[in-house]
Image: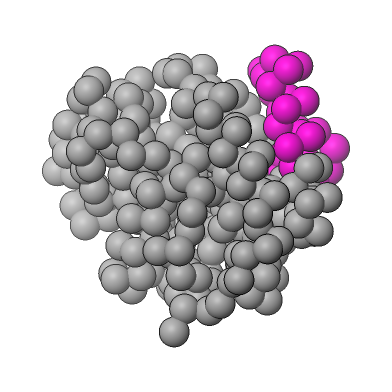
Amino acid sequence: MRRLIIIPTYNERENVVKMIRRLMSMSESFDLLIVDDGSPDGTADLVRAEQVSYGERLHLICRSGKLGLGTAYIAGFKFALEQGYDRVFEMDCDFSHNPDDLPRLDAMLDNTDVVIGSRYSQGVNVVNWSMGRLLMSYFASKYVRIVTRMPVADATAGFVGYRREVLEAIDLDAVQMNGYGFQIEMKYTAWRLGFSIGELSIIFIDREEGTSKMSSGIFGEAFFGVLKLPFRTIKRRQ
């Protein structure tokens, strides 16, 4: 069983080396792919230096400019499929997603096609967010559930595990949203294609170092993009 973690980065020099070493030191075997969007702070150079120590377990894709979260993950998914990985995980670089939860996500994939590290499946498990941001995130997931009828409590979550079969079935080139709406679209597409989705309750802790990438434009894309999802024709990729 080959497992790959994909982490998109943009200006994450405060976190990237710590995250790489944390993931590479885990007793469970996960490989890691960093997809860096031309970070001007030298994030990619730090990853290259770590590749000397970790060899073929640590991969790097460098892209020219800030091209967005969704396209970063799409590039990572295509890499994972080409390289023959069986399970693929998304997570952030800033330690808001606890690496210790990865083995639990992986175990749930034994019986579920997609597993979400969920902030809202058992109450609200978010630490250090402002009340405004927390309410926006919580009610965004409620909004997604009402519009799409998808039975997921945390549709915007970015801590996710996929079986290979799911990514093979989704037409990755047809994914339209690029910001945090991408997370909603991927889950919705998998659900519409008949794959099972499970949620694992986690505790989300806001980043201590670096800068959040959330913006009003990203929120707007997700808000209006969700309205279109129920009217989309979604077919399995041949």
Residue 19 in the image: state x and y as whole percent: 39, 35
Query: Please, is residue 37 above or below residue 211 in the view?
Result: below
Q: Is residue 125 magenta?
A: yes
| Colour mapping used in the image | one colour
User: What is the x, y in percent for residue 43?
Assistant: 25, 29
Q: Is residue 224 above or below residue 134?
A: below
Name which quarter of the figure residue 29 lies in. bottom left
Q: Position of residue 34 (x, y in %)?
A: 31, 44
> Is any part of residue 117 visible from this angle?
no
Q: Quadrant of residue 187?
A: bottom right
Q: Locate the C terminus by quadrant.
A: bottom left
Residue lying at the far bottom of the rendered structure: 238
Residue visible at 68% across and 76% down in the picture = 194
Q: Verify whether residue 123 appears in magenta.
A: yes
Q: Quadrant of residue 45?
A: top left
Query: Residue at 79% across / 34% down in the picture?
Result: 139
Is 43 on the left-hand or right-hand side of 176?
A: left
Q: Which residues are magenta?
A: 114-141
Residue drawn at (32%, 50%), measured in percent from left and top? 33
Against 19, residue 185 (above or below) is below
Say whether residue 230 is visible: yes
Q: Which residue is at a point 56% across and 77% down the rendered structure image?
A: 235
Q: Quadrant of the N terminus?
A: bottom left
Instruction: State the residue in front, 164 or 174.
Output: 174
Q: Is residue 71 above or below residue 165?
A: above
In terms of depth relative to the viewer, which is nearer, 193 or 25?
193
Residue 87 relative to residue 54: left or right = right
Say left or right for 113 vs 165. right
27 or 184, which is in the foreground?
184
